[in-house]
Amino acid sequence: MTKHKSGNYEVGYGKPPRDRRFKPGQSGNPRGRPKRTLSLLELFASELKRTRTIVEDGQRLRVQTDRILIKRIIDLALKGDLRALKIAMALIEQVRDIASTRDDRNVSAMSPEELAAYYNQLRSIRPGDALSNKVKRSFT
C-alpha cells in the first residue's frame, strides 16, 4: 500500500487520500437520484389528503381537503342548492351501495376457485362509474 505524506495513513480500498475526500457538508452525488414523477391519480390523492385551515363556528380548524369538500357539498345542499343536492344524493346512494355489497367472507377458508370467482366479482364493482353516470344524467 502507498503511504500518504502526512504520517502513518495508509491509502487504499475505502481509504482515499485526505485531500481528495469529500469536504464536510458536501455530498458524493450532489444532484442525487432524480425524484419520481407522480401520476395524476397520486397527485390528486395527495392534494385531497393535504390539510387546510378553515374557520367553523368561529374556530380555526386544520382539516383534510376531502373532508372540506364533503362538508361544503352538504352545506350547499342544506341551503337549497339543487346541483349540490343532486351530487350529495348520488354520493349517499353510492356509499349505501358500497356498504350493502360489503361481504364479510372468510377468505382464508375459500377454495382457489371460489377465491378467483370472488376476486372477479370484486373487480367488476367500479364505484366511480355509478356516481359519474348518476351525476351526468342529473345535470343533462
Image (cartoon, rainbow, N blue to C red):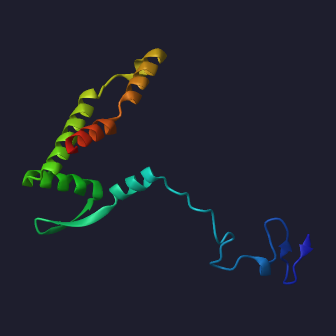
Q: Residue at x 17, y 50 (%)?
A: 83
Quadrant occupied by the C terminus? top left
Q: Residue furthest left?
A: 79
Q: Nearer the viewer, residue 100 or 109?
A: 100
Task: Provide residue 46's location: percent of width, then percent of height.
Answer: 39, 56
Task: Provide residue 88's location: percent of width, then percent of height.
Answer: 18, 45
Judge whether 113 appears above or below 91 on screen: above
Left or right, residue 6 beside residue 54: right
Q: Residue at x 18, y 52 (%)?
A: 73
Judge whether 23 appears above or below 53 on screen: below
Left or right, residue 54 beside residue 124: left
Q: Residue at x 20, y 36 (%)?
A: 93
Q: Residue furthest bottom?
A: 6
Q: Nearer the viewer, residue 6 or 68?
A: 68
Judge whether 35 appears above or below 16 on screen: above
Q: Residue at x 39, y 54 (%)?
A: 44
Q: Quadrant of residue 97?
A: top left
Q: Residue furthest front?
A: 140
Quadrant occupied by the N terminus? bottom right
Task: Provide residue 125's location: percent of width, then percent of height.
Answer: 35, 30
Q: Nearer the viewer, residue 108 or 48?
A: 48
In this view of the protein, can residue 51 be seen by the observer? yes
Judge whether 120 appears above or below 95 on screen: above
In this view of the protein, can residue 111 be seen by the observer? no
Q: Quadrant of residue 2?
A: bottom right
Task: Provide residue 6's location: percent of width, then percent of height.
Answer: 84, 84
